[in-house]
């Protein structure tokens, strides 16, 4: 079979490894379509582009068909009880990869691709790229023998595409381990610029501080929205009650973000006559919560901490503003609320 007639589906994150895999398969003459996955927890390190825009930019440069897949609320619900557990943070790496490949299988079937290929490197990531984990993931995703990993394929067991004669093992690479030197050298040989040598980014769920915020959110919400998880990226977070959380902007940029991300029904606290941060109150239904939020707002404003000052609480979507006097919360109390 002519390789131009062999449709393949590549997973493209926009990072170095997946870009090399895609370029290699194109050079070998395959008909390549790429799939780009995003979640609320992607933490890209690109200077100018996020994962999605980087992947789409690459696809356009290589004149490839690209499909984006956003894993949103279904992914968040999976976090509540991942079948295969989590890493040091709250990262469910195995369940994440299985979910991705199940959706990739649907896309593969939809376009009539013969197999899927990825930029995975054997033994690069301990939770998901050890040999036994690679097998486990493809088996549970219903893709046994149908995932080709061009960067490490020469070190792995023959896949169905190899057995069918659709790929040649001698044209595949034999990279393994965590060092990225081989990929950087190959990238240079392929004419890739230095900016392309960075990784595709990371997952916020591996970060201990973010993981603590995510656990808190999941434990206090029955149905967690994508918008709520995005708020975890911004500001200082304080758990005031089972239903109420207060978020305080740390700088002007975060104040602007919080203002844009606030939803109808949320409360905003403003300090009268003093400069202060954007303070967002989420989930509150009782006056006591907003009064504690006012005390927190004063703590992070320019107002004196040992005097009563005037504050104003307004509810987004409503014209009502409630003014009252309050003073800064004590350090002992606020520490117990910090998420």
Image (cartoon, helix red, strand yellow):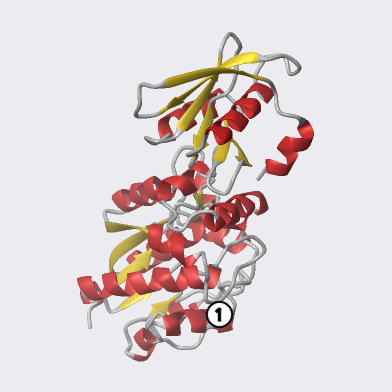
Q: Residue furthest front?
A: 287
Q: Could you say where residue 339 lies in the image, as x and y percent from the top left?
A: 65, 45
Q: Could you say where residue 32 lies in the image, as x and y percent from the top left?
A: 29, 66
The answer to whether any part of residue 168 appears in the image is yes
Q: Depth check: 121 or 183 in front?
A: 121
- The correct choice, above or below, for 104 with respect to 290 in the image is below
**Quadrant housing residue 150:** bottom left
Q: Could you say where residue 17 lies in the image, as x and y percent from the top left?
A: 50, 61
Quadrant of the image containing the N terminus: bottom left
Q: Depth check: 152 or 229 in front?
A: 229
Q: Depth check: 157 or 336 in front?
A: 336
The answer to whether any part of residue 28 appears in the image is no
- The correct choice, above or below, for 216 with respect to 100 in the image is above
Question: What residue lies at 33% left-to-right and 65% top-to-bottom?
Answer: 26
Determine which residue is flagged by label 1.
Answer: 133
Q: Report the number of numbered marks.
A: 1
Q: Secondary structure at mark 1?
A: helix
């Amino acid at each position: 079979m002519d390789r131009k007639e062999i449709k393949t589906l590549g997973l493209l994150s926009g990072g170095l490894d997946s870009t090399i895999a895609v370029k290699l398969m194109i050079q070998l003459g395959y008909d390549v379509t790429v799939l780009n996955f995003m979640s609320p927890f992607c933490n890209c390190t690109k200077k100018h582009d996020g994962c999605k825009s980087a992947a789409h930019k690459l696809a356009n440069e290589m004149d490839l068909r690209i499909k984006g897949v956003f894993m949103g609320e279904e992914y968040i619900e999976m976090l509540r009880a991942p079948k295969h557990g989590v890493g040091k943070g709250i990262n469910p790496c195995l369940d994440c990869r299985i979910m991705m490949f199940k959706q990739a299988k649907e896309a593969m079937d939809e376009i009539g691709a013969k197999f899927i290929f990825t930029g995975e490197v054997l033994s690069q990531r301990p939770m998901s790229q050890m040999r036994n984990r690679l097998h486990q993931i493809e088996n549970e995703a219903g893709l046994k023998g149908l995932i080709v990993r061009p960067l490490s394929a020469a070190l792995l067991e023959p896949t169905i595409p190899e057995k069918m004669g659709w790929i040649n093992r001698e044209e595949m690479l034999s990279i393994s381990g965590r060092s990225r030197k081989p990929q950087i050298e190959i990238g240079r040989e392929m004419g890739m610029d230095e900016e392309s040598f960075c990784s595709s980014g990371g997952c916020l769920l591996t970060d201990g501080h973010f993981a603590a915020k995510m656990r808190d959110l999941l434990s206090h919400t029955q149905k967690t929205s994508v918008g709520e998880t995005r708020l975890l990226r911004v500001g200082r977070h304080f758990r005031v009650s089972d239903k109420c959380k207060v978020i305080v902007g740390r700088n002007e940029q975060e104040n602007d973000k919080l203002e844009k991300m606030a939803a109808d029904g949320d409360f905003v606290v403003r300090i009268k006559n003093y400069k202060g941060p954007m303070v967002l109150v989420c989930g509150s239904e009782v006056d006591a919560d907003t009064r504690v939020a006012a005390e927190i707002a004063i703590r992070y404003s320019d107002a004196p901490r040992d005097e009563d000052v005037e504050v104003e609480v307004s509810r987004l979507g409503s014209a009502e503003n409630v003014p009252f006097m309050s003073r800064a919360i004590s350090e002992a109390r606020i520490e117990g609320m910090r998420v």
